[in-house]
Image (cartoon, rainbow, N blue to C red):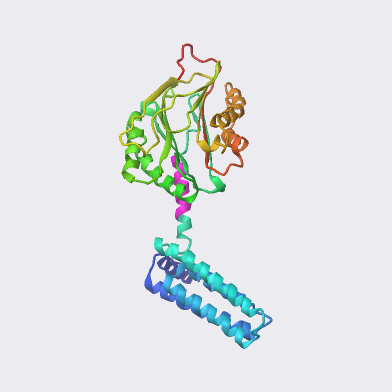
Amino acid sequence: MPALIARVRRWYGRLLDGDVRAGRVALGVLLGGTAGLSVLPILMPYGWPPSALVLPVVGGGLVLRRGQLRVLVGAAVAGSVLGAVVQDPRGVRLGVTAVLAVTGATVLTANRFRHRLGLRGTQGDSMLLELAEHNRTLARLPERLLDWHFDSALAPAGGASFSGDFLLCAHRPEEDLLELVLVDVSGKGSRAAARSTHLSGAFAMLLGRVPPEAFLPAANDHLVRMGWEDHFATAVHLALHPATGRYRLFNAGHPSPVRYCRGGGWEASEHGGPALGLVPGARYPAVAGRLGRGDSLLLFSDGLVEVPGRDLDDGVGRLLAAAEPVVRAHRTQQRPDRGAAQRLVHAVAGQVADDRTLVLVRRLGDHPPSGEPGF
């Protein structure tokens, strides 16, 4: 028995890899099953449902080539029609045949996309899951670094695993440098998510390999070369030196980050350059500052604060009002509250049909150094 199971696994592996002989065997097995499922309802009209013919059709849609699947669907529909003719042509069997035909058309449509990608079985799902996990790895922030606490939340529209927003992080301890990049690709839905997935890989190759001041210009050049018509991306890039609290912000058409100063409330940063992909050779000036103990920095995407028909400042104000108790409470806590960013996203824009991302950068402590410059 173990030898048989191993043999079947090897055959299934060849089938998913597109082996022609394995595909012919699979078609033969499914056609045999279709023939049996066509005859059984005739021999056992009260013991076997004719609707069982959908099973080989669905199974074939996962593993067969397009031409083979057409043969299988035709055989299943023919078997159902045969049973309807032999039994009662005015009975429910004609309804079962119609449902089977619709199922076959649906499976053929889905198979067309799988066939274009060369994927069979659950290969496509496995690849997407692996890609989603890879994107989460690229966005992983340090849980605790010196006296810093980092928290982020990304809520894709519709609860999907992919988003038009993405976050990248690169830490170079030898240079006392932590870089965070939040990117928002134009558009919504699966197309924005596809462009976001492409850009996350390309930008991850740049982050940490070029000086901070060169990152956004290089990212902009990449999008310009891509030539995406009517598409662009906004981004904000934070280059932080944890030992001193000094940082630089580079902005490409993104909502301005906001700093919480322990003694003075909220301060918005200045705007930077244009969105990525619009202006060849665009420049992105740095905005320098320093986070003292008890200070925080908020980075967010427009989906978190933008409400159709209302001023953007209203949404930003709503976010800051919700975030202030959180950043105040973390001035002295030695064990920062995990998940605060996620709760803020749901409190501020829980029902918004857009991608929403929030990053909280907080420096813990009671006594900020004196003489710290603002934005």
Indicate whether residue 134 is drawn in magenta. Answer: yes
Horizontal and vertical percent for residue 244?
43, 20
Q: Residue at x 35, y 40 (%)?
A: 205
Horizontal and vertical percent for residue 137?
45, 42
User: In the figure, 130 relative to 48: above or below?
Assistant: above
Task: Say left or right for 360 vs 230.
Answer: right
User: In the figure, 227 relative to 97: above or below?
Assistant: above
Furthest residue to the front? Answer: 309
Horizontal and vertical percent for residue 59?
51, 69
Snapshot quadrant of residue 288: top left
Looking at the rendering, the stretch of residues picked out in magenta corresponds to 127-138
Task: Say left or right for 21 vs 145.
Answer: left
Judge by depth and name the residue closer to the eye, 248 or 283: 283
Q: Residue at x 47, y 47 (%)?
A: 133
Q: Is residue 26 visible?
A: no
User: In the figure, 48 relative to 246: above or below?
Assistant: below
Q: Residue at x 53, y 44 (%)?
A: 156
Q: Residue at x 37, y 36 (%)?
A: 207
Snapshot quadrant of residue 345: top right
